[in-house]
Image (cartoon, rainbow, N blue to C red):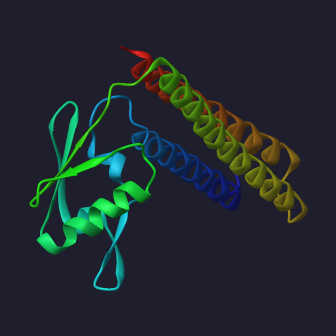
């Protein structure tokens, strides 16, 4: 196969991998009834005028399966962190004892579980769309290479290879999605 065509295929594989990694990151933020520091990922706190990720101004950990503990390195940050957690609209209420924040993760109701499964399915579809967009862009690049001297057979072969990659990554997304749904629905 043409070197340039192979380069497009390799790039497509990397981009598809990136879509799956992003999908896994998004799923980590969806709480499945047990405490995980990943739930607070994405929260930034105003640290001396600079928006700073929570994990850079405090230790974030779990004490048990239902409790997240946030211990700021500076006690003056405690009210700011508490405010940002409430503002993030995660459905979590931290309790402040003056030194640390404890966040108790409530047990999920059946209704909430179904809403989370819907969210997982939505994220999975977004990831599948991202993978398919990579396939489309790569196929368009291969077709453009045909005009620059790539044979039609090589172009078709490249497109088949890209389709195999697409099928593989979509299957990975489906498997990850089903595992997360099972985790959420487990009582």
In the image, residue 178 lies at what x, y percent?
Answer: 51, 22
Q: Residue at x 58, y 39 (%)?
A: 123
In the image, residue 5 lies at what x, y percent?
Answer: 70, 56
- Asked if residue 42 lies left or right of residue 56, the reply is right
Q: Residue at x 59, y 29 (%)?
A: 118
- Asked if residue 145 lies left or right of residue 29, the reply is right
Residue sitting nearer the eye, 103 or 15:
103
In the image, residue 143 lies at what x, y percent?
Answer: 85, 54
Residue sitting nearer the eye, 27 or 81:
81
Q: Residue at x 73, y 53 (%)?
A: 138
Image quarter of residue 179: top left
Q: Residue at x 65, y 31 (%)?
A: 167
Where is 63 relative to 146, above or below? above
- Asked if residue 17 lies left or right of residue 30, the reply is right
In the image, residue 99 lies at what x, y percent?
Answer: 9, 60
Where is 3 relative to 187, above or below? below
Where is 111 relative to 157, above or below? above
């Amino acid at each position: 196969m043409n070197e340039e065509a192979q380069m497009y295929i390799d790039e497509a594989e990397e981009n598809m991998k990136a879509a799956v990694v992003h999908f896994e990151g998004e799923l980590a933020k969806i709480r499945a009834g047990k405490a995980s520091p990943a739930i607070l990922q994405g929260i930034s706190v105003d640290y001396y005028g600079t928006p700073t990720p929570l994990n850079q101004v405090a230790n974030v950990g779990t004490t048990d399966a239902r409790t997240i503990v946030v211990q700021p390195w500076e006690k003056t940050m405690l009210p700011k962190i508490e405010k940002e957690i409430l503002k993030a609209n995660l459905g979590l209420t931290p309790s402040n004892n003056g030194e640390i924040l404890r966040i108790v993760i409530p047990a999920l109701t059946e209704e909430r579980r179904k809403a989370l499964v819907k969210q997982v399915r939505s994220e999975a579809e977004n990831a599948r769309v991202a993978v398919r967009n990579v396939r489309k862009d790569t196929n368009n690049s291969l077709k453009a290479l045909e005009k620059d001297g790539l044979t039609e057979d090589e172009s078709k072969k490249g497109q088949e290879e890209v389709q195999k990659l697409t099928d593989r990554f979509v299957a990975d997304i489906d498997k990850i999605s089903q595992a997360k749904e099972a985790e959420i629905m487990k009582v």
